[in-house]
Image (tube, rainbow, N blue to C red):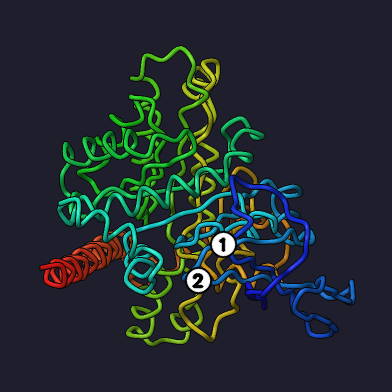
């Protein structure tokens, strides 16, 4: 694994992403393998002697100061995109946003965020203090303060990924930001929030995240019809996924735009959480057959989702949209970190590789895949086996409708709690700041 280490006076060349100040502290990526030697002293160049047969791994840790990064060698992430057409994204965002640079150099092609990620970032770092103080002293209410903090991070991250966005003609290089989770049951409120947030961020490569709750399906159609690119999140079932695809297609058809090439979308299909719930249900059943199916439900359903994707984005209806420049709504695998330590740490990455897809990985999954992940087309390698597992689970009494509904409920509730907790802590911090200034 690796870390970004602060040097007193480093000397290295770096790829340029956005503006940087030469006076800020510098960071360099340490690549560590099972066998290597390194020599490093303050003011010296970084010298690495690495056994080329050993695969290195990369980890970026958020810091409380401004960051910088150096280019690193080609990784499994580059191979994943170039050989299999899957885009690796990073499921995390915090300040300094420039800490993303080593990840971009290592093959990361986009970023996802959510209320839980920002709750952790803002509540545990001092890097937001100056902007927070300025906003409070300017008389901003806490909701406004939150969005100002978040939007700055999103805008800064979008700047870093602009090159990828431009080189792929809008096919990659996106940064996702979610509307308030309080609106998950509000169709009109979600659509209005998405429009406001899109205008507020004002970046071509931003994805506005909208949850795939039943009330928000019409919101997705409306927002897409306005030419706003969307990351549809919290998808846990095949039936809801199909509704999400239909909302995207309906939105494109309703847009009235002659050129649809700049309206894109991803559908975030959650994986590991499915096994977390289904495994518990299987353990309650307790038969040898049930226990043998633990850890298999999520990837089986994901394989069926990819099969559905292939069917929906083909045929006359889709071809008519392609003539106007429409791009497929890519499947994005989310919740890719392993929750059960007994399972392989790349369980929700290696088996889900396929063209025109995205895998967004938090630190744990990203490190594991760079270190020992396998690059091969696997998502549709054995569709019949996936269908068999899905059916076997149904025969054992697993209700896929219940699984999807329960996980959606838990997901929305989790994001609401993170959102509310952060706003509460920001309010307390603001009150303290006002008392100090009395």
Q: CA distance from mark 1 to mark 2?
A: 8 Å
When the figure is inspected, residue 80 is found, relative to residue 158, above or below; the finding is below
Write the residue at 15% across / 51% down.
139
Place residue 100 in its image quadrant: bottom right
Which secondary structure lies at badge 2?
loop
Quick one: 144 or 191, which is closer to the camera?
Answer: 144
Q: Residues within 10 Å of mark 2 (few under 14, many from 20)?
A: some
Residue corresponding to mark 2: 63
Quick one: 345 or 174, which is closer to the camera?
Answer: 174
Q: Residues within 10 Å of mark 1 (few under 14, many from 20)?
A: many
Write the residue at 68% across / 46% down.
85
Which secondary structure lies at badge 1?
helix
Write the residue at 53% across / 25% down.
315
Residue at the extreme front of the image, as rendered: 438
Q: Is residue 184 left or right of residue 97?
A: left
Quick one: 396 or 119, which is closer to the camera?
Answer: 119
User: How far across and down, in percent of the image, does residue 277 sit?
Assistant: 35, 74
Write the residue at 17% across / 40% down.
189
User: How far across and down, in percent of the image, does residue 248 sit?
Assistant: 39, 33
Residue corresponding to mark 1: 99
- The answer to whether the residue labelled 1 contacts the one labelled 2, judged by CB atoms less than 8 Å apart, is yes
User: How far across and down, in percent of the image, does residue 154 sit?
Assistant: 42, 49
Q: Is residue 391 left or right of residue 243?
A: right
Q: Is residue 142 left or right of residue 102?
A: left
């Amino acid at each position: 694994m690796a870390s970004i280490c602060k040097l007193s006076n480093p000397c290295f060349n770096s790829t340029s992403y956005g503006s940087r100040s030469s006076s800020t502290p510098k960071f360099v990526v340490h690549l560590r393998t099972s066998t290597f030697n390194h020599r490093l002293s303050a003011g010296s160049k970084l010298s690495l002697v690495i056994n080329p047969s050993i695969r290195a791994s990369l980890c970026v840790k958020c810091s409380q100061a401004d960051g910088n990064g150096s280019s690193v060698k080609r990784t499994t992430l580059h191979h994943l995109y170039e050989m299999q057409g899957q885009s690796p994204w990073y499921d995390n965002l915090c300040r300094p946003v420039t800490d993303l640079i080593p990840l971009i150099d290592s093959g990361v092609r986009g970023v996802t965020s959510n209320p839980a990620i920002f709750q952790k970032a803002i509540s545990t770092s001092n890097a937001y203090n100056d902007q927070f103080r300025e906003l409070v002293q300017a008389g901003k209410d806490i909701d406004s303060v939150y969005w100002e903090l978040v939007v700055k991070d999103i805008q800064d991250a979008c700047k870093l990924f602009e090159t990828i966005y431009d080189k792929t003609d809008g096919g990659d290089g996106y940064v996702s930001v979610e509307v308030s989770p309080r609106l998950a049951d509000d169709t009109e409120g979600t659509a209005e929030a998405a429009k406001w947030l899109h205008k507020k961020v004002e970046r071509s490569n931003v994805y506005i995240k909208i949850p795939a709750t039943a009330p928000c399906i019409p919101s997705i159609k409306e927002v897409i019809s306005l030419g706003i690119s969307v990351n549809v999140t919290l998808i846990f079932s095949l039936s809801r996924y199909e509704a999400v695809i239909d909302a995207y297609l309906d939105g494109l058809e309703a847009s009235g735009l002659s050129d649809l090439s700049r309206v894109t979308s991803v559908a975030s299909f959650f994986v590991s959480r499915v096994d977390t719930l289904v495994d518990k249900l299987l353990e309650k059943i307790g038969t040898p057959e049930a226990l043998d199916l633990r850890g298999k439900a999520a990837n089986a359903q994901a394989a069926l989702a990819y099969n559905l994707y292939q069917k929906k984005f083909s045929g006359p209806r889709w071809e008519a949209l392609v003539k106007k420049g429409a791009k497929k709504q890519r499947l994005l695998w989310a919740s890719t970190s392993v929750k059960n330590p007994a399972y392989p740490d790349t369980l929700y990455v290696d088996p889900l590789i396929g063209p025109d897809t995205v895998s967004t990985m938090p630190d744990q999954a990203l490190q594991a895949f760079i270190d020992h992940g396998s690059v091969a087309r696997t998502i549709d390698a054995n569709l019949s086996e996936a269908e068999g597992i899905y059916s076997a689970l149904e025969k054992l009494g697993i209700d896929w409708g219940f699984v999807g509904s329960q996980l959606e409920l838990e997901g929305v509730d989790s994001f609401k709690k993170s959102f509310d907790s952060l706003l509460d802590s920001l309010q307390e911090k603001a009150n303290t700041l006002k008392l100090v200034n009395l």
